Image (tube, rainbow, N blue to C red):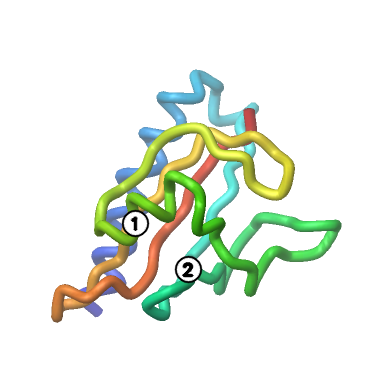
């Protein structure tokens, strides 16, 4: 229950930041979001609104060479531009950390540019 509250809090914080950065009104903004799991090496999208080749991008990996990956493995958030499956986004990623202090996953919220 504690982790669900933490996820809700993080999403609640990321959403307004994304909207403010994009400068677009809510009615004109399409948001994409993902929940990613972390196995000690890869961040994998377990749930997502992202599409790849016309299919759900679920079970795809976060690019390990990208700035979001590098920030997340250091248990830091990342906000900035990202290209995801050939589309430019204003992206926000936040790490999910278990009660034991271990990195367990991440959340993504982004707006297409």
> Residue at the location (43% across, 49% down)?
68
Q: Which residue is mark 1?
A: 72
Above or below: residue 48 compared with residue 70: below
Spatial CA span between label 1 and label 2:
9 Å
Look at the numbered disc 1 and give the secondary structure of its residue.
helix
Residue farthest along the top direction in this orientation: 23
Q: Nearer the viewer, residue 31 or 91?
A: 91
Res 82 label: none
**Quadrant position of the C terminus in the picture:** top right
Whole-percent x and y of residue 12?
A: 33, 48
> Residue at the location (55% across, 21% down)?
24
Q: Which residue is mark 2?
A: 43
> Residue at the location (51% across, 33% down)?
81
Q: Earlier in the sequence, mark 1 or mark 2?
A: 2
**Quadrant position of the N terminus in the picture:** bottom left
Q: Nearer the viewer, residue 64 or 55?
A: 64
Does residue 40 appear left or right of residue 65 in this picture?
A: left
Residue contact at pointers 1 and 2, CB within 8 angstroms: yes
């Amino acid at each position: 229950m504690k982790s669900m509250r933490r996820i809700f809090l993080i999403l609640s914080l990321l959403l307004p930041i994304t909207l403010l950065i994009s400068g677009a009104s809510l009615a004109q903004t399409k948001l994409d979001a993902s929940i990613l799991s972390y196995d000690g090496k890869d961040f994998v999208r377990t749930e997502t609104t992202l599409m790849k080749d016309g299919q759900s991008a679920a079970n795809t990996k976060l690019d390990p060479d990208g700035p979001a990956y590098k920030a997340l493995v250091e248990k830091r958030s990342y906000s900035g531009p990202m290209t995801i499956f050939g589309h430019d986004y204003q992206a926000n990623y936040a790490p999910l950390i278990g009660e034991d202090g271990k990195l367990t996953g991440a959340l993504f919220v982004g707006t297409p540019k």
